[in-house]
Amino acid sequence: MSDVDDITALLYRYARAVDTKNWELYKSVFTEEAVIDYSSATPIVGSPEEVANMLREGFALIPWSVHYISNVEVLESTDDTARVLDMFYNPMQLPGMSDPSTYCGYYHHEMVRTPDGWRSRSLREDNLWLVNPPTG
């Protein structure tokens, strides 16, 4: 497989980890020192361990979510690093809401090749819109 295929597979693994609430799999997408920034939609910023713990708590209240990853672009790359942009579309059932809510936007990753394959050392979410936001 090519580097782009490997990176795309990593992004798909990220989506599956979140939707199945598999936080060990989630952490495996990142380097240990990675910084994850979801602040465009939530107050969550931190290391993979810190963010996984926050998501574990928050997603325990979410009955279901489905992350679609598309439009994967490697914007810049060297042999061992890549700047990656991908789009997400994320319908989910938020607690207390009768209808699903949908988030959409871009993920900005700084990737690095490790002995275990490509990993994200930086993820910044750029949430563009939300349909049916939570109330209250």
Image (cartoon, grey):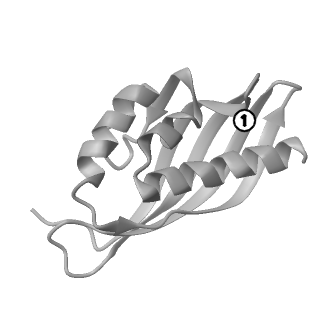
Residue 134 x/y as whole percent: 20, 65
On screen, residue 81 versus residue 111, left or right, reads right
Quarter of the picture holding the C terminus: bottom left
Q: Residue at x 76, y 22 (%)?
A: 115
In the image, what residue occupies the spot 40% across and 52% down? 21
Q: Nearer the viewer, residue 81 or 11?
A: 11
How many discs appear?
Answer: 1
Q: Where's residue 112, x and y in %?
A: 72, 26
| Left or right position of 119 against 3 | left
* Residue furthest to the left: 136
Q: Looking at the image, which residue is at 61% across and 58% down?
A: 87
Camera-nearest residue between 115 and 97: 115
Q: Kindly identify which residue carries mark 1.
A: 83
Can residue 63 be seen in the rendering of this structure? yes
Whole-percent x, y for residue 68 in the image: 57, 65
In the displayed structure image, the side of residue 47 where residue 112 appears, left or right: right
Residue 91 figure quarter? bottom left
Q: Is residue 71 left or right of residue 55?
A: right
